[in-house]
Structures are given as structure tokens and as C-alpha cells.
Image (tube, grey):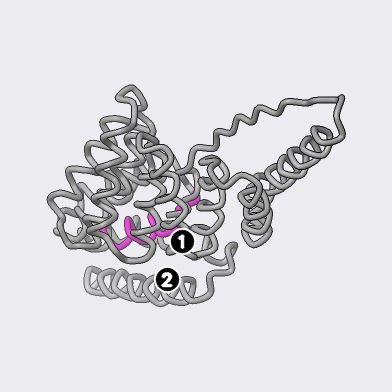
Amino acid sequence: MNYFYRYIFGLIIAIAFFCYSSLVAQAQGVFELKDTNLERCFASIELADYQMAVADCTKAVSLNKDNPELLLNRAIAYYRQGDYQAAIADNNKVISLKPGDFRAYYNRALAEAGWGNYQKAIASYNRALGQIPSNSSSLLADIYTDRGLARFELADFPAAMADFSLAIRLNARNPRAYYNRGCICFHHGDYLLAINDFTQSLQLNPANIQAYVNRGVARHQLGYQQAAIADLQQAVKGFSRQNEQVAYQKTIALLKRIQHILASDVEIADA
């Protein structure tokens, strides 16, 4: 997942301000404290400070235990910390408060998938699909893409392929769907189709360095060694910029092997 644009942030807080009794003034101060904690929680999520986000959301939740928006945001922070069980628990609380809120089912599914429970994740994705408005094409595409990933993990490749293709029909500018469908095509040896999907994914998201690697290997399998080398050289540059040393070294080794194959082919042709 970073894939991290999956969530919907919607928060409406109505605060009534009263001025005349000390008791009400004290209550107003509590609301202000809650609002401050909530704003800090929201800001901390945006800044990727998830530990602080959990702390601030927890303070706000202690003042209003039945606010689904607070629980949704804390679940997001838990999820991004990798605390999938806590994220699932908070999303379950939201579902008990708002059974028709597709966000809680979707977020729970992501946490279940992160925890490795793909069957449960698929069931939660299905519940989300049953709640989401039918005109939300982009969101539907994201859910189908993520359900496809869960099915891919279970080696249910035909169902995963169907999900990725449906996601593309709903949103033709979904780079994850193209990339993941390309991976299935590659897995089945459909290298031309894989190259097409990796190319589409890269046009939409050039930052996906692994797509260069995969396209390069697919081109190598089809004998397009110069094109494969060009892709792997792009990947080497990208991994170097990102300081991904393991991926960098593995790609360098693969690049050298293909360059050696190309040099051998040239020698044979010259002979």
C-alpha cells in the first residue's frame, strides 16, 4: 500500500459556544481542548508523525468516545504505524456506531491485509463495495485494486486480474491497477501485455522504480536487450536516489548479466 491516498479525510465538528454560566464556560473549555487535540491529530497524520497522532486522537476520544471521525483518524494513525490490530479495533467501533460507513470497512480491510489475513480483507472490501456510492468511480477503482492485491496474495490470479481490469475501466488513470495487472501478465509469461501495462503505469507514475525493473526483465525475456538495459539503467538511478541499497545492488547485478548477454550476442554475430 503507500500507497497512502486510500483514505478519505472528512471532518465536521459543530461546537456550541455559551457565555453566561461558569459551568457552561468550563464545558466550552473541554470542547476547545478536544478541538485542539483533534487538529493536532489531523496535522500529525499529514506530517507522518503517527505516534503523536495516536496520542492526540486518544485524548480527543477520551472526551467523546462515540465520535466516529475521531476513531477513523486514530485508526489511520494506527494503520500507518503498522499496528493493524488496533486499527481493526477502531474501525470495528466505527462500524458499530455507523454500520453504513464504507470508509470503516475499507480501512479495516487494508489493516486486515496488512496483518496478512487476506480472506477477511476480501470480505471487508466486499462490505465497503456494498456501501459506497456507485458514482464514486475513483474510490471504487481503489477498492477493486486493493481487493485484487489480496486475491493476488492468495494466488487467485484470475479473480485478481478481473479486479485490476475493472479498476482500470472505472479509472483509466490508476497506476497501481496497471502495475499489478502487469505483474500478473508477467507471472503468466504474457510479456508483451506486461510491458504494455508497466508502460501505462510509468506514464502515470514515473516514480515507481520497480516498474522499470519489471518492464526491463520482460523486455529481456522477449530478447529486446537494448530496451531492457535502458529500463534497468533507469531503475539503478532511481534506487540510488532513494538510497535503496539492496534493490540497487540486485539491479546492478541483473544489468551486468544482460549487458554480458548482449556483448556475447554481438561477438557471435561478428564471428
Based on the picture, tell me whether residue 75 belongs to the magenta stretch: no
At which x and y percent is residue 270?
26, 70
At which x and y percent is residue 169?
26, 31
Quadrant assignment for the N terminus? bottom left
Q: Is residue 1 visible?
A: yes
Which of 80/60 is in front? 60
The crowding category of the residue bearing disc 1, from other C-alpha atoms within 10 Å (few below 14, some 14 to 19, many at least 20), is many
Amino acid under disc 1: Ala
At which x and y percent is residue 209?
45, 57
Residue placed at 41% from the left, 62% from the top? 232
Secondary structure mostly seen in the magenta stretch: helix
- Horizontal placement of 69 versus 42: left or right? left
Residue placed at 44% from the left, 49% from the top? 93
Residue 121: give its label. none
What segment carries the magenta color? 207-218
- Horizontal placement of 99 versus 51: left or right? left
Quadrant assignment for the C terminus? bottom left
Instruction: Classify 24 as above or below 154.
Output: above
At which x and y percent is residue 80?
52, 58
* Residue 58 quadrant: bottom right
Which of 75/176 is in front? 75
Of the image marks 1 and 2, the number of the one nearer the N terminus = 1
Based on the picture, tell me whether residue 216 belongs to the magenta stretch: yes
Residue occupied by mark 2: 251
Residue occupied by mark 1: 235
Asked whether the beta carbons under mark 1 and mark 2 sit within 8 Å of each other, the answer is yes
